[in-house]
Amino acid sequence: MSSATTSATSAAPRRDGRVGSDWAGPALRPAGFNAKSILWALIVPPRGYRTLPTISGWVLVLLAFSLGLAAYNTASNILFIALSLLLASLIMSGMLAWSNFRRNRWRLTTAPRFRAGEPALCRIEIVNEKRFLPTYALMFDVRLKESKVETSVPLARRLDVGVTLELPVQITPPRRGVETLELVRVRSLYPFGFLMKILPGGVQRPVWIWPARVNYVRHHPLSPSASAEHGAAQRAGPGTDLLSLRPYRPGDAQRAIHWKASARVQRLLVRQFAADAAAGFRMRIEGQAELWGDPEHFERLCGLAATLAEDLFREGRLVAVAVGSGLWRPVRRLSELEALLDEIATLKPSPPSGEPPAAAGGENVLTFAPAEGRRVHAYVDGELAATA
Amino acid sequence: MPTSMENSRPQLNHDELQLSKWLLGGVLSLLALWTVFYVESSSNLLAVFASLLVIGSMASPGLSGRVPAFVQAASVPVLVIIFAADLILGTPFLEALIRLSMLLLALRACLPRTRREDLQLVVLGLFLVVVTGVLTVSLLFGVQILLFSAAAMLYLFVVTLSEAARTGTEPDSRRWTELSILRLLLRLRQAINWRLGLLGAVLLVSLVAISAVLFLALPRVQLDSQLDFLGVNRMGSTTGFSDRMELSTVTNIREDQSRVLRVEVDDPSVLPDVPYWRMVVLDEYRSGGFRESAALRLAQQHLFGRRGLFPGQYDPDLRRTEFRIYLEEGVGRYLPLTGSFERLILGDKLDVRVNPFTLTAALTQKPPRMIGVRVLGMEASGTVLEDRSLLNDVELGERTNLHETTTNPFGYSIYSNEAPGTGMIGTSYPETTMDVPVSLEDRALLAQWVAEIRQGRTLGPLEFATAAVDWLGVHHSYSMQSELESELPPGRDIVVRWIQSNGAGHCEYFAAAFALLARTAGVPTRVVAGFKGGSWNRQDVDRPYISVRNSEAHAWCEVYVGGGAWHIVETTPGGLSTGPSVGGLAASLGQDRGFSAWLDSLRMAWYRRVISFNDKSQEQLVGRVRETAMELAISLREQAELWATQFRNWINRPWDPDRVIDLVALLAVLGSVGYLATYVWRRRLWLVFASGSRLRLDAVRREASRWLRRLRLAEERHGGGKGDGDEVRLSLERLRWGPPRERAEALRELERCRRAVRRLERGPRA
């Protein structure tokens, strides 16, 4: 998963041409920034920089046009004064908007993994690097590029000089997959609402969207009673068998303290129990296209597989997984579970091979099969274990 | 400056911003409604009502939410119906439009507003301010539009902030109406600091500066056919001079010190010591009053296309003394002229008519605002020459009976068979200037007094005028209140009665009495109403002008002296009876001083430089800028050439030890100065002399703080490890927070850190 994090960082734009920066915004001077480039930018705005009149702006333009027409036809200097003031306010609006954006930088921080159908929380961190002026009324547009889900986050409060602010962004991915979460644009109506100034957001991050959790019914092989038939797992967990003793940590329950052992070693020790469970299931996920031709059916398979994998891992009963015709790989650590979910996130129906499905191989192998009504059954060694 | 996660000042929340928006909307509406009070119309009462409504809604924002939705929805259609009814009832379109705007503005200010209504409020307010500005053309408009613009920008700014801060609040929440205005003010006091205030002031100054530049730079085109803006020229004023003079008390006018007339003259030497600004000439006497006879009125000629010109038609080759006259609104439709003239140029497209026999000019409509008139080659000698070249024979012949005649000393006579609207029949000019329509008894009295004035002498017109004025001065004193009884015996003339009474009277009594006496003596005489004198305003020393007040309204007479010439006679005791003296430079006039004079000069500057600004002014401005630039360039070049020549001469002179020493010393001084400057710059030595800030930090600590911030930013941008700048940071932190150090050592340390931070800012080379 470290490769995912790295790629997320490296995917950040590098307008400044420097490595390692995940910040964007006008505070980062583009390479070759000088007076000439500023003048040129006034004529040909940089890519993504746009200024659009709002309804108020159009009204102002119309007013200015009408006043100009009246002023020229009547030669009335009063009208010329009003026209000058209108145009001056338009110019000042542009100048203030420019100064509002100036020397701000922002970045998008987020967990690299979302879950489909559940709101994901990210943050936009914004810093005002100006020396005198606060920043007001920015609007950040964030979207998931592939699924075209977009949300807007306003800077609802004043951002004083030198202040860093974190804006929470809530976005709900509609489906699993790998998406690009991007800060599409930053826009503002500041100061008078005549013009909508738009700057490119300049921040992108790839995110893995795990399948949505599905509701399923467990049958005997996966039920808690079945797990009791087996011994305790050899790792810590909420079981009843003593696994080992460990030093006391704040927050440990007092009843867990092993007083005798503590008295012996002159420091507090608490009991650590072995996790229950243990059937040690191995899960094989096969998405042959001939079985899972219906996309909705296939999505349900992914959802059930991911949900079961998470639940069994939490219960300490997931030993290994195999996706498609791949080899078995152990799932002992959280990172291994995440890798599995990442894989499920991008899982696609495998093309028909003409060969029979691979043999489950060994005991306690959890496999999946389509059922009527777009339902999905999970089997343990051929016995129905769960239905979604 | 380290970053923090919190703002240093409190910030208004959404509800407080909403209340601010509401109050600012009210202020904006009041500013717009305020402008209506300066327009002479019958809408003032409505403006008061609307203002009270707005003030009430500002004081109780909660009331706006209690207006039922159907009332809100029906209000605009109802107002439009009222507008239509207003028009049907005969109200002029513009006035009806102003009323509608006021009502809509009040409505918008009193009812809940979304962004669309916010915009409507601003547009309606702007409309009112601009329309009233076009109507009044006063200096106050400048103040009003500036205040309105500032308030509108602040309002729109708050609207933008309020919308941005709306996140998380209920869209239709009216919780803000429960906030206390006093509490809001206290919060504002906390949220606004001097820096924000300064920024606001800078923005306002910038707005004015940019507007001024745009105003001067917007290309002006003189169109041949100018249009009225919403027909504002059709709105009339209600006061001023008229073509009648009834004898009455003049206390009100005398106490009115408002300025009605301002005159600039190119060459003050053409002015007499006391100028007489002739507005209207009254020739016909009837029933105790003077009026302009129908015959004389019919002799008026349109000046358009003849001697009346618009600024675009100005003939630059015509170089004559130029009078620039600015006439306030309400004075009436008569223009103040001192005598015959060559060109009359109007600043606005107004229809003007000139009477060639009296040399008076009148607009066909009362101007609703201040107007500017330029008169070229105008005489101010005290003698008014009839200018029959102005006559348009064809036009006059169709409307009047102009006959050459020998029955009067003028050689002509104009008959009017009917005077429209007066019911008078059979007047003829200039016979009206000799007519004394009084009873036989009164005529006998007049003849008796004329004989008394003549004392058996044969007097010419001016001699008689002098004697008559002296005689009147002996028998009557000047007073603004007449002591004449209100009820006259039947058949008696009021003027004759006044002469007989030996009572006091004002200028109109004296002028009327003189006219009757002179006419009885056979001297054609007419009464003139206008202004006498004025006072110099020299606040702008380059362009002094004469300002004339309402209290200087006056009446006098003109007597015919032959050859088509009429001579001014000052009939009121205390003045020169034979009128003004030529070349007096208006020296008898007083000087305006003090704040009032300064304010008036501002007003004059407003008219001269702003209202009268046109394409010619723009060309002149461009020419002046070009000339100044050229002069500057030439002067610099000449100065450079002079220095070069001096240097060459100095080099070419024979060298001796003294000169060599001089040269070496000069080079040494220049080198030392250059070295010192470089040294000071590189080592930031001015910090040694820099004073502490309000935080009582010395300059080095402030600099260290600044470089700490740059260091942090550099590290953040480059994503560098913390170790890269640790040493520099420690040094800077020691400088910033550590114990006081010897100044020179601290500066050396700061310089080292500065270089290191710069290096870090440049980052790793790609």
Image: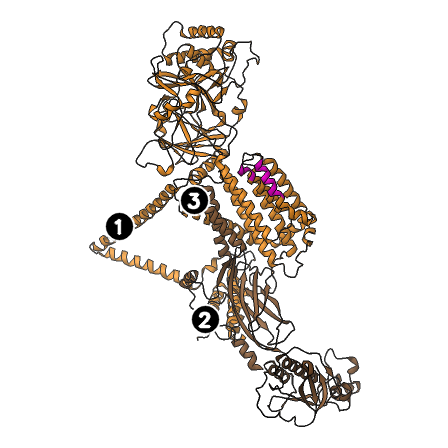
Name the mark nearer the viewer: 1 or 2.
Answer: 2
Q: Position of residue B666 (x, y in %)?
A: 30, 57
User: At label 2, which amino acid type do we have?
Assistant: Arg
Q: Residue furthest bottom?
A: A362
CA separation, marks 3 and 2? 54 Å
User: At label 3, which amino acid type do we have?
Assistant: Tyr
> Which residue position holds label 1?
B642
Q: Colour of chain A?
A: brown
Q: Nearer the viewer, residue B459 or B585?
A: B459
**Magenta-colored span:** B78-96
Chain of residue at mark 3: A
Chain of residue at mark 1: B
> Which residue position holds label 2?
B762
Assess whether mark 2 and mark 1 are in contact (beta carbons under 8 angstroms).
no
User: Do circles 1 and 2 both sit on a common chain?
Assistant: yes
Chain of residue at mark 2: B
Give the structural element (helix, strand or loop) at label 2: helix
**Label drawn at residue A72:** 3
Name the mark nearer the viewer: 3 or 2.
Answer: 3
